[in-house]
Image (cartoon, rainbow, N blue to C red):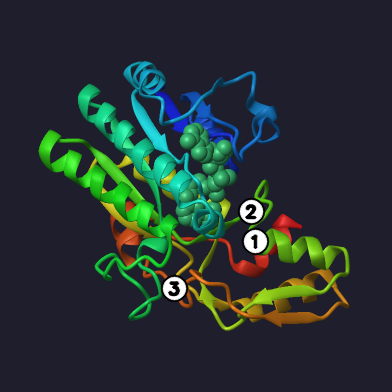
Amino acid sequence: MSKKILITGGAGFIGSHLAEGLLNMGHEVIIVDNLSRGNCGNINSILNRINFVKGNVTDPGLMQDLIKSCDTVFHLAALSRVIPSIDNPELCFKSNIEGTEIIARLCSQYGKRLVFSSSREVYGTAKYSPVDEKHPLDPENPYGTSKVAGEKIIESYSKCYNLKYAILRLANVYGQKDFDRVIPIFIKNSLNNKDIIIYGGQQILDFVYISDVIEAFLKAYSNNENLLVNIGSGKGTTLLELANIIKKITKNEGKIKIKDKRKGEVEIYISNINKSHEILEWKPEISLTEGIKRLL
Ligand SMILES: NC(=O)c1ccc[n+]([C@@H]2O[C@H](COP(=O)([O-])OP(=O)(O)OC[C@H]3O[C@@H](n4cnc5c(N)ncnc54)[C@H](O)[C@@H]3O)[C@@H](O)[C@H]2O)c1
């Protein structure tokens, strides 16, 4: 049955793909985004099929009107990267914590289910690997801290006001429309035959392709239980390996240059995805090499 779905941050990388996925399922989609990072180019192809509202998730009046009139909220709006959160923690905490509190409160008040886009950053550097959902939460930067706070706010509204929710802890997502995270930067430099700069190099990260992530969101939407799951590839890749894969596929003749690791960046994360596999019957389909080829 067609439902009315609100996506916060829907003009961003993941949100715009999610909007397409929900439209393809026959749902009505409303996007709210302040365009601080997302842009209308991301949703150009679906602009005549959605309702787009330019606005801020920290505006309680606006959010009340939007949440009242929808069936489910996918909350993706956030200051979404680590380094900008270190540069401007105040903005990060306002958007990510205050915004999430407003949305969780209104979803509780109006009885709407909330699907929240959390991050592997809640764990910090892995104390064991692969990291399951019981791993201690020990974020290393304001962004990770804001996601822990967002999760805890949602769980407390659930305990006290019966909020129905799904929390997805995403690993490093990559795909079309992303532009300034590690994979798009490496690809851009490689296609221009430039050197690839790596900060650190030995960090091990888990890269998951956008279509797999959207599938996970859609499955979490269809599942009515309260849930908290990791979404990742379940495989670890060092940044050096990643640079070499991209160099090889793009036939880049530049060098790989290693610079000092940046403060606040996690050193190792590989997700244990057994729980999402069991509960959502979800597993990633696209390998890193295949995903990078599709992206190119
Ligand atoms: N991309 C990843 O690898 C990844 C990994 C883990 C978690 N996440 C989370 O998934 C979500 C989506 O990530 P993304 O990669 O699409 O990021 P993105 O930055 O492309 O999208 C976030 C969107 O939110 C909007 N936004 C920011 N603050 C807002 C506010 N206060 N009010 C309204 N809109 C606002 C931005 O304009 C942007 O369009 C984020 O919550 C992010 O933290 C992403």
Label 1 sits on what residue type? Answer: Gly
Q: CA distance from mark 2 to mark 1?
A: 7 Å
> Which of label 1 and label 3 is nearer to you?
3
Image height of 57 relative to 167, above or below: above
Q: Are marks 2 and 1 in contact (CB under 8 Å)?
A: yes
Give neighbour class at mark 3: few <14, some 14-19, many 20+ (Cα, 10 Å): many
Which residue appears at 39% of the width and 69% of the height?
A: 124
Label 3 sits on what residue type? Answer: Ile
Q: Is mark 3 within 8 Å of ligand 1?
A: no
Front residue of 41 and 78 = 78
Q: Extreme left residue here?
A: 160
Q: CA distance from mark 1 to mark 3?
A: 18 Å
Front residue of 207 and 54 = 54
Relative image position of residue 287 (x, y in whole percent)? 59, 67
- Mark number for residue 270? 3
Q: Which sits earlier in the primary sequence, circle 3 or circle 2? A: 2
Which residue appears at 28% of the width and 35% of the height?
A: 104
Q: Which sits earlier in the primary sequence, circle 1 or circle 3? A: 3
Label 2 sits on what residue type? Answer: Gly
Relative image position of residue 277 (x, y in whole percent)? 35, 60
Residue located beneath label 1 in the image = 291
Q: Which sits earlier in the primary sequence, circle 2 or circle 1? A: 2
Front residue of 270 and 2 = 270
As helix, strand or loop, the secondary structure at mark 1 comes to helix
Indicate the quadrant where residue 201 lies.
bottom right
Give neighbour class at mark 1: few <14, some 14-19, many 20+ (Cα, 10 Å): some
